[in-house]
């Protein structure tokens, strides 16, 4: 729909308002802009209303021309806002960071969602019980994609039991969660990154083997141990695990041996 005549009407009304409403009856440009609205007025009741109000600003016996001009401008602006668009020249590009399906939106009442959001965003005590009870009563709330980023962030919560509880819920998600788990992953991080690896294992398994291998060289402490354990999902990693079992010590060596043992069980 061509809205040029509506834009022109708005511009002429603004110009007339600045010049003074007492001169509007003699403004032939404004009158022409109003006349151009006639065909469009037949297509929609709202355009018909705009045309009717604009015509009233031009009649000599208009009771309050100033108020009518302001009301007409307000309606025209509202209509253009609802009909407006955004156009940029060039090729369309996908927005990064939204790979895959990350859940759906649910019509959740504010009374249910507000305490959950407050618990995820807050600090202090009591949040664990709020989230646990909300999940027990309305688990569908936590399937809403708008909560996913907060849930992933909660994996690093200072209250370990809360973080572990959220990790348990996320292990029941599908692979649509993978991009959020990999986003800003720190192989030298702490328990939060361990939880991320464990969730990746649960929902993606060997599909994220390339990621485990990529993060391993820079990994430290618990994160390194978790990544070594994750290698067990891919049979092709057997040589890597054998080498790690020879060269590593302590928990890292145990993780490599565990991976080899798990591979052996599956091959039997």
Image (cartoon, helix red, strand yellow):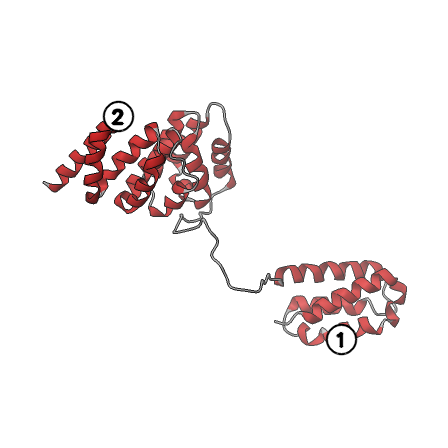
Q: Residue at x 25, y 28 (%)?
A: 248
x and y, in percent, of residue 41 in the image: 68, 72
Give the answer, above or below, for where 97 lies relative to 84: above
Q: Nearer the viewer, residue 126 or 190?
A: 190
Residue 193 appears in which quarter of the rendering? top left
Mark 2 or 1, nearer chain start:
1
208 vs 125, left or right, is left
x and y, in percent, of residue 215 in the image: 34, 39
Q: Residues within 10 Å of mark 1 (few under 14, many from 20)?
A: some
x and y, in percent, of residue 184 in the image: 44, 39
Q: Residue at x 73, y 58 (%)?
A: 74
Residue 65 appears in which quarter of the rendering? bottom right
Q: Residue at x 66, y 66 (%)?
A: 46
Q: Residue at x 75, y 61 (%)?
A: 73
Using the rendered image of the protein, determine whether residue 172 is visible from the camera's viewpoint: no
The residue that mark 1 highlights is 35
243 vs 18, left or right, is left
Residue 63 appears in which quarter of the rendering? bottom right
x and y, in percent, of residue 196 in the image: 36, 36
Label drawn at residue 251: 2
**How many angstroms separate mark 2 from mark 1 (CA)?**
83 Å
Front disc: 2 or 1: 2
Give the answer, above or below, for where 230 lies relative to 221: below
Q: Secondary structure at mark 1?
A: helix
Label drawn at residue 157: none
Q: State which quarter of the image contains the C terminus.
A: top left
Give the answer, above or below, for where 86 lies relative to 32: above
Using the rendered image of the protein, determine whether residue 201 is visible from the camera's viewpoint: yes
């Amino acid at each position: 729909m061509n809205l040029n005549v509506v834009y022109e009407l708005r511009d002429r009304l603004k110009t007339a308002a600045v010049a003074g409403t007492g001169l509007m009856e003699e403004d032939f440009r404004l009158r022409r802009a109003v006349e151009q609205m006639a065909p469009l007025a037949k297509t929609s009741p709202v355009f018909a209303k705009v045309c009717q109000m604009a015509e009233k600003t031009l009649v000599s016996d208009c009771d309050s021309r100033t108020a009518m001009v302001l009301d007409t401008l307000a309606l025209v602006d509202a209509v253009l806002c609802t009909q407006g668009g955004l156009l940029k020249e060039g090729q369309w590009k996908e927005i990064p960071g939204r790979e895959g399906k990350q859940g759906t939106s649910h019509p959740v009442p504010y009374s249910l969602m507000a305490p959950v959001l407050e618990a995820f965003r807050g600090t202090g005590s009591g949040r664990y019980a709020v989230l646990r009870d909300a999940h027990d009563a309305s688990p569908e709330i936590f399937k809403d994609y708008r909560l996913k980023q907060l849930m992933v962030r909660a994996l690093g919560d200072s209250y370990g039991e809360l973080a572990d509880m959220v990790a348990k819920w996320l292990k029941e998600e599908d692979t649509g969660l993978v991009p959020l788990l990999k986003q800003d992953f720190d192989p030298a991080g702490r328990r939060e990154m361990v939880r991320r690896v464990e969730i990746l294992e649960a929902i993606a398994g060997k599909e994220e083997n390339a990621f485990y291998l990529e993060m391993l060289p820079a990994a430290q402490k618990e994160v390194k141990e978790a990544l070594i354990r994750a290698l067990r999902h891919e049979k092709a990693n057997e040589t890597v695990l054998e080498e790690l079992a020879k060269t590593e010590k302590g928990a890292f060596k145990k993780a490599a041996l565990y991976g080899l043992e798990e591979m052996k069980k599956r091959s039997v």
